[in-house]
Image (cartoon, rainbow, N blue to C red):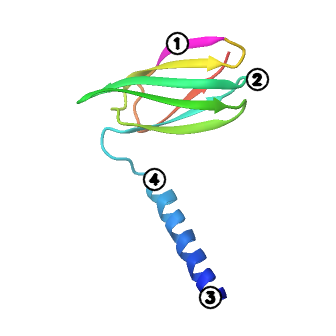
Amino acid sequence: MKICRLVCLVLLAGFASWIFFSSSSLPPNSLEVEFINSSEVMIDRIQLDFGYAQGQSQIQTLRLAPGEARRLLLNHQPGAGFNVQVNFADGVKQDFCANRGEQGSHQKVILQR
């Protein structure tokens, strides 16, 4: 029984490592964006709107604490920019176009007030 658990644990660790290390290469025309809440206020919602060859997409992520970072994967060409709406817990809203002209498939957006 202990050997079975050990084998399962080793397989699970190997699979997790494979996912972690293989995530550095993204599919073509995709973009990984890390959002960082550098404010002192909870972010209730981040909404992204962006276009791609076949249409339009919208992604939302919820509850980003102060100092927290979150990565999102977009089916979107780097450099094209994307619309961002940020709703802070105290009612403040920000709307902007992010990373237009920014090259590279791994990008950051620092959210501050």
**Badge nearest the viewer, 4 or 3:** 3
Asked if disc 1 and disc 4 are in contact, CB closer than 8 Å, the reply is no
Q: Is residue 57 left or right of residue 53?
A: right
Q: Residues within 10 Å of mark 1 (few under 14, many from 20)?
A: few
The residue shown at (48%, 64%) is: 18
Q: Estimate the x, y position of residue 22 in percent, counting from the top left.
A: 44, 58
Q: Which tag, 2 or 1, sits closer to the chain's start?
A: 2
**Tag 4, which secondary structure?**
loop
Q: Which residue is mark 2?
A: 40
- Which residue type carries mark 1? Asp
Image quadrant in which you'd find residue 53: top left
Magenta segment = 92-97
Q: CA distance from mark 1 to mark 4?
A: 29 Å
* Magenta-colored stretch includes residue 36: no
Q: Which tag, 2 or 3, sits closer to the chain's start?
A: 3
- Which residue type carries mark 2? Glu
Q: Which residue is mark 3?
A: 3
Q: Which tag, 4 or 3, sits closer to the chain's start?
A: 3
